[in-house]
Image (cartoon, rainbow, N blue to C red):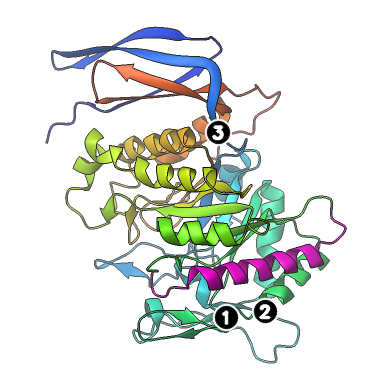
Amino acid sequence: MCILFKLVLLYLWVHWVNKGSDFVTGGSGNVTSGTVFVNGTASIGKTDDNFICATLDWWPHNKCDYGTCSWERASLLNLDLSNPILLNAIKAFSSLKIRMGGTLQDKVIYETKDDKSPCASFVKNSSEMFGFSKVCLPMSRWDQLNVFFKKAGAMVVFGLNALSGKTKRSDGSATGAWNSSNTESLIRYTVNKGYSIHGWELGNELCGTGVGAKVAPDQYASDVKSLENIVQNIYRGFEVKPLVIAPGGFIDTNWFAQLIQRTPKSLQVVTQHIYNLGPGNDNQLINNILDPSYLDGGAQPFRDLEAILKNSATPAVAWVGEAGGAYNSGQNLVTNSFVNAFWYLDQLGMASSYDTKTYCRQTLIGGNYGLLNTATFVPNPDYYGSLLWHRLMGSNVLSTSFSGTTGVRAYAHCSKQSRQKENKLPE
């Protein structure tokens, strides 16, 4: 296989208008030339200042894919929060968004003061959805997580169990109204403890045909409205309230359009998930990452969601709530290596150009696609790519094109305002 960097990711930080620039690259005697054109007269999109986001998942150590168990102690329930590399890795961003959630979140219940028995842990059970039993989040662990994230300066988004109270039918449909009592208890506890939550996200991959289960858009809209009512009630008097976020799944244009149409005042953020590289055991994974025509297909979900939002009356914005590229925990030595940057950085540029406000990488740590090594916590190559993006790329996205070859990617943003002080890199 020839790896000659035929795909070049070129990021420009510009202050000038309508600037053209010649670009030449080559290797092994081959030369490619072309012109980059950046239209600086107006932005085509605007990201959040904290565009970069990373996830933490629930998967226990015995979550295995294709005969490999890659999660170790990276679960929300047992991640070592005392590790200094982990703390510094988050602090280096100065307000990194952290989305806590994932496949098992719709099987999590939250401990309450009335519980008389200890919280249960995940137990492997092939007869259960996703192969694991339900689990309980102890409030002592919730305390530890919130104290840690405050110390790290993170902006916390928490994924809520949207299947509580529902009945799952043989076709995978989960019917009935959402039982919000356990969620309300968690949110009240959180507010009483003074913990800061940037957003509450309802459900994980229950939209469209669903993954494990599915909820109809009209019922999901009703459930989102219930969450919005809870947030408005419990946070009454707060100048800034947490965002209400949903649905956290793969885009189905008809389903998403119906949800957004039914929640014009309740939903502030619409989240979609991206795993466009296919399964983690695909032996063509590196070829796909380095194939510009394959990567071009990654634009469609961004294009679809942007169009739905523009054609609706909602003020809601688009986020990527979870993106690991290759599903089922990624592939060791690929999705946690340098080559993955050709997919990841292209995704960041592409998502921004379609007015996506935040992009959450699966994961900060855990699986074979973490920004940090699951065993040692040492940063993987994509960690540095995400940190560079955070520090250099401003929120205003500029129209950018490259003429000369389809094998060169060019994205441009206005530069980020320099900071007086940046936190040091993790060590």
Q: From the viewer's perspective, is 167 left or right of 235? A: left
| On-image quarter of the C terminus | top right
- Between label 1 and label 3, give the one nearer the viewer: 1
Residue at which label 1 appears: 164
**Which residue is painted at 52% across and 9% down in the image?**
17
User: What x and y, as percent, mark residue 99?
Assistant: 56, 55
- Specify the farthest residue to the bottom: 116
Residue 399, compared with residue 295, is above or below; it is above
Residue at which label 3 appears: 390
**Which residue is painted at 42% across and 69% down in the image?**
61
User: What x and y, as percent, mark residue 358?
Assistant: 55, 43
Residue 173, compared with residue 117, is above or below; it is above
Q: Are marks 1 and 2 in contact (CB under 8 Å)?
A: yes
Mark 2 or mark 3, which has the lower sequence index? 2
**Depth check, front residue: 30 or 153:** 30
Q: What predominant SS class does the magenta segment belong to? A: helix
Kind of residue at badge 2: Asn
User: What x and y, as percent, mark residue 39?
Assistant: 47, 15
The verdict on residue 228 being magenta is: yes
Q: Which residues are magenta?
A: 211-238
User: What x and y, as percent, mark residue 69?
Assistant: 33, 66
Quick one: SS at disc 2?
helix
**Depth check, front residue: 153 or 184:** 184
